């Protein structure tokens, strides 16, 4: 039997982004001074697809190497039961949106003038979704561990082939660090990840939005937009205007998006947000250095295991 399974790296990367988006309103209880931090050197994000923040190295979104190794192990496990299809669990770096590309909403003038607020990744995601195949009950049970616990007279691994692969990649991982308020993400396969850095980044992002220096820059952006005939409280409101929910960008959407990006540039909003958020994240990193070192050790161990799998070890 020959089938393909599709699981997008972009979706996994966005898992961390969704934690920031939903938990950001709750802040962080890391015990760090909640006053406004002094700013370091001015941050020029440049191309947002390449922009990184201090906590990014500790975020729980799986590394591409880990996903590639997971694929190798899953394909091997499935083949042992007679399923010789391709399990695709990772994409090239250019096949999905980088995690920080729209962190400060729309910033690309070329996107604004051609797509408005729409994402250039939408067609890629739709094509991938359309190409996903249905699994037979036996395939799903074997892959995920949900359903019968035996197939062809053999026991299915706990959590299926996917669970077995993830446990293999977690071998030798140090004891999982935890922090009050930070969720522990369970995947049903017998492995879990404590989203400590995601939690700290969520609090930092929320504090950045409420920082007086960012709020002043947003006020300048608002005045700039009003001068162009557009009335929004914040860039987020402009970005999320329900009028932009159609399949394509209208002339009004493109006009709004173009003005939005121009006002961000005129008021230096993106650099201000990046500089302020960097300061908040750096403060969290320094205050939580010990537990974040444990997080990094967990991630590094998984990557080392993945490299061994990919090398045939």
Image: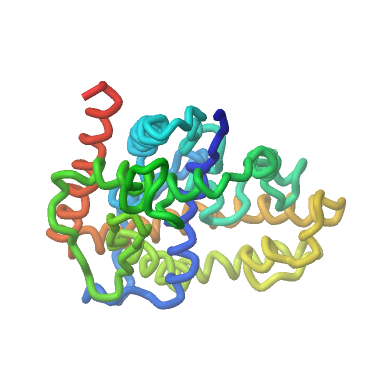
Q: Residue 222 versus residue 187: which sits nearer the camera? A: 187
Q: What x and y, as percent, mark residue 279?
A: 32, 59
Q: Residue 260 versus residue 174: which sits nearer the camera? A: 174
Residue 236 seen in the figure:
yes
Q: Is residue 89 left or right of residue 302?
A: right
Residue 48 seen in the figure:
no
Q: Residue 303 versus residue 135: which sits nearer the camera? A: 135
Q: Find residue 148 and report its image quarter.
A: bottom left
Could you tell me which residue is drawn at 44 percent across and 63 percent down? Answer: 20
Q: What x and y, as percent, mark residue 73?
A: 34, 34
Could you tell me which residue is drawn at 51 percent across and 71 percent down? Answer: 215
Q: What x and y, as percent, mark residue 197?
A: 30, 59
Q: Residue 267 versus residue 61: which sits nearer the camera? A: 61
Farthest residue, direction front: 153
- Name above or below for residue 182 compared with residue 300: below
- The C terminus - image quarter: top left
- Name above or below for residue 72 compared with residue 163: above
Q: What x and y, as percent, mark residue 265?
A: 60, 50
- The N terminus - image quarter: top right
Could you tell me which residue is drawn at 49 percent across and 65 percent down? Answer: 21
Q: Is residue 7 left or right of residue 179?
A: right
- Name above or below for residue 218 compared with residue 165: below
Q: Is residue 84 left or right of residue 219?
A: left
Farthest residue, direction right: 251
- Total tally of numbered discs in the picture: 0
Could you tell me which residue is drawn at 38 percent across and 49 percent down? Answer: 150
- Name above or below for residue 217 compared with residue 252: below
Structure colour scheme: rainbow
């Amino acid at each position: 039997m020959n089938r393909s399974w599709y699981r997008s790296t972009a979706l996994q990367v966005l898992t961390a982004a969704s934690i920031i988006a939903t938990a950001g309103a709750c802040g962080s209880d890391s015990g760090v001074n909640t006053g406004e931090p002094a700013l370091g050197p001015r941050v020029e994000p440049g191309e947002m697809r390449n922009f990184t923040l201090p906590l990014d190295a500790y975020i729980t979104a799986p590394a591409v190497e880990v996903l590639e190794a997971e694929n190798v192990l899953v394909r091997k496990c499935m083949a042992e039961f007679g399923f010789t299809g391709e399990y695709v669990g990772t994409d090239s770096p250019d096949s999905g949106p980088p995690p920080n590309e729209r962190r400060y909403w729309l910033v690309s003038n070329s996107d604004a003038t051609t797509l408005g607020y729409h994402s250039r990744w939408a067609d890629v995601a739709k094509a991938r979704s359309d190409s996903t195949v249905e699994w037979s009950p036996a395939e799903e049970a074997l892959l995920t561990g949900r359903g019968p616990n035996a197939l062809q007279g053999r026991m299915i691994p706990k959590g299926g082939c996917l669970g077995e692969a993830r446990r293999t990649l977690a071998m030798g991982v140090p004891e999982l660090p935890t922090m009050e308020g930070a969720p522990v993400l369970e995947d049903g396969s017998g492995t879990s990840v404590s989203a400590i850095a995601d939690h700290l980044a969520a609090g930092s992002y929320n504090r950045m939005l409420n920082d007086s220096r960012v709020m002043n820059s947003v006020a300048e952006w608002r005045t700039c937009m009003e001068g162009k005939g557009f009335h929004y409280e914040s860039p987020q409101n402009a970005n999320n205007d329900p009028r932009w929910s159609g399949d394509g960008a209208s002339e009004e959407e493109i006009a709004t998006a173009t003005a939005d990006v121009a006002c961000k540039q005129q008021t230096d909003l993106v650099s201000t947000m990046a500089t302020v958020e960097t300061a908040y994240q750096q403060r969290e990193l320094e205050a939580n250095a010990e537990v974040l070192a444990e997080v990094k050790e967990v991630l590094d161990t998984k990557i080392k295991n993945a490299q061994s799998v990919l090398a045939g070890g």
